[in-house]
Image (cartoon, rainbow, N blue to C red):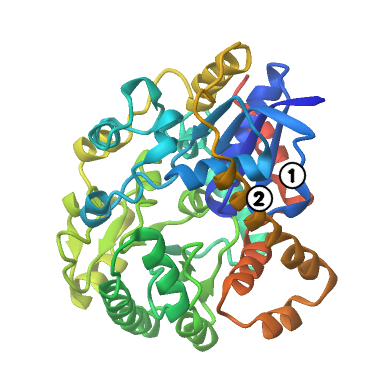
Amino acid sequence: MAVLDVLIIYERKQRELENAILLQIELEKRGYSCEIVQFYEAPKFNFFNQKIPKVILSPHLYNTKSVYRNFARFGHAPFLVNLQYEQVLSKKWEELGAHTPKGLAQNFYHVCWGEEVVKRLIKGGVPDKNIKTFAPLHLDLLRPEYRPNQRVLREDLAKDFGLEKDKEWVLFLSSFTYADIEDNRLKMNEAAAGTDLSDFPVIHSKSRNKLLEWFRKVLNKESDKLFIYRPHPDELSLDKIHQIEKEYSNFYVIRDEAVKTWIAASDIIYSWYSTSVVEAHFLDKPYSILRPYPLPDSFDSVLLKHGTFIECYEDFERDYFLQDEERAFAIEDFYIKKYYQVDSDIATHKLFADFLEMLINSNQSQQNFPFDLKEYVLAKTKVLAVYPVYIANKLFSRVWLTRVLGNSGLFAQLNKEVNNQIATNSEKKKIKTMIQKVIFQSGE
C-alpha cells in the first residue's frame, strides 16, 4: 500500500494555498512527499484508503465530526494536525466556543499563533501536550529576507488585472460575510455555531452600506487613485459592490491572489473588521480601521478592539488624502504580539517542517481512541454528496448549473465551493514558481 508523508488540506484558496505550497517546498527539499488538496476536490478523496498519509494538516478541527470527516475523505493518518486558520475571533465567538476543539478533536495537535489563543484552548480542555505554538505561515513571506519588491509586484498585478501601476492604489480589506446574506446560509451558520446570529446581518449590512456611501463620496472627489475592494472569501452578496464598479472606472472588485500580495503592492490600506491588517503591520505599512458605527463589545475582534478608528466621513476623507509619511498604524505592537508570536531568527515554515519531520519518523500514532464505526460510516455517506456536484461542475456550464441548483441548499453550496475554491494545476504551478524564486533570491 502506497504511503504519503504529508497531506495538506486547504479550504479557502486565497487564504491558505500559498502557505501550503511554501510548506510543501520545504518538505520536498528535505526529501519528503507532500500533496495539497482542497476540501471538496472529489477526485483526490481517499475513499478506499489506497494512499494513507502519515500526517494530515487540516484547516480546522472543531469536534468529533470534524475528525471523522477528515479520515473519511483523506484516509486514517496516524497524525492529524489542526492548522486552525481562524484564531483571532470576537469576544462572542470565543464565549460560544465553536472554534475551540471539542470531543475527539482534543486528542490531536492544534497549532496556535500566540499566547492568547493557547490560553483559550487550554481553558476549553485541550491538553497542553497537544498544543504547538508557531507564528502563522502566512506571515513568512513578509519577513525581510523574503519580502517582495513592491515595484515589481505592482507591475505584475497591473499586467494581470489591467491596473495602472503608476497611480496610487487604495486597498479595502472587506469582511462583510453577513451583509445581505441569504436566509439559508445564515441558518447553516447558525446551525454550525449552535446559536442565534440574527444580529450579524444587521451589523454587517448597516456598516457596509455606510462605507459604500463614504467610498462613493471620495470617488467623486478623486479619480487619480485606484480603489481596490477585496471581498472576504465568504462574502458572496456583492451586487451593491459591483454596481459601484460599474459607476466608477477606477473602482475594482478583485478576489484573486493572496491578500498579502495586495497589501504589499498597495499604498493606502483600510479595513473594517479584517485581521488581515496584521499583514500590513508586519510589512511595516501603515493602515486604518473604518468604523462608521460602533460595534458591540461582544461582536468586535479581540485584537482590533484595541485599535484607533476612523468613525466619520470627514475623518475618512482627511485620511484618504494624507501624505504617506503622515500615516500611522491603527494597532499598537504590544497587542499584535499577544496573538502573533513571530520568531525573528527562523521562518515558521522551517520550524513547522521540523515538527512534521519528527511526526513522519515517529513510530507512534494519535489514533489511540475507540473507533466509532457509526460516525465513520455517516461521514463516508456525506462524502458521497460531493462527487455528483463535482462531476456536474466539470461537465456542464457553470452558469447553467448555477441556474439549475439555485443559491440555496446543500448541492448549491457545494457547487459554489467547487467553482470558487479549487485551484487548477496551473494556479498551483504559478504560486510554486513564484515562491521558489523568492526563496532562491534570499540565498537559500
Residue to which mark 1 is pinned: 47
Residue to which mark 2 is pinned: 380
Which residue type does callout 1 highlight? Phe
Q: Label 1: how many residues lie within 10 Å, few (<14), some (14-19) or many (20+)?
A: some
Name above or below for residue 32 compared with residue 311: above
Toward which corner of the image does residue 201 lie, by quadrant?
Answer: bottom left
Contact, mark 2 vs mark 1 (Cβ under 8 Å)? yes
Which residue type does callout 2 highlight? Lys
Name above or below for residue 332 compared with residue 26: below
Quadrant placement of the C terminus: top right
Please tell me which residue lies in front, 249 or 122. 122
- Residue sitting at 39 percent across and 39 percent down? 103
272 sits to left or right of 25: left
Please tell me which residue lies in front, 310 or 209. 209
Quadrant placement of the N terminus: top right
Give percent across and percent down for residue 321: 30, 68
Query: Is residue 360 in view from this perspective?
Result: yes
Please tell me which residue lies in front, 370 or 84. 370
Name above or below for residue 105 compared with residue 222: above
Give percent across and percent down for residue 22: 61, 33
Toward which corner of the image does residue 336 lie, by quadrant?
Answer: top left
399 sits to left or right of 153: right
Query: Is residue 321 in view from this perspective?
Result: no
Please tell me which residue lies in front, 425 or 291. 425
Q: Label 2: how many residues lie within 10 Å, few (<14), some (14-19) or many (20+)?
A: some
Q: Secondary structure at mark 2?
A: helix
- Residue sitting at 52 percent across and 82 percent down? 242
Toward which corner of the image does residue 298 lie, by quadrant?
Answer: bottom left
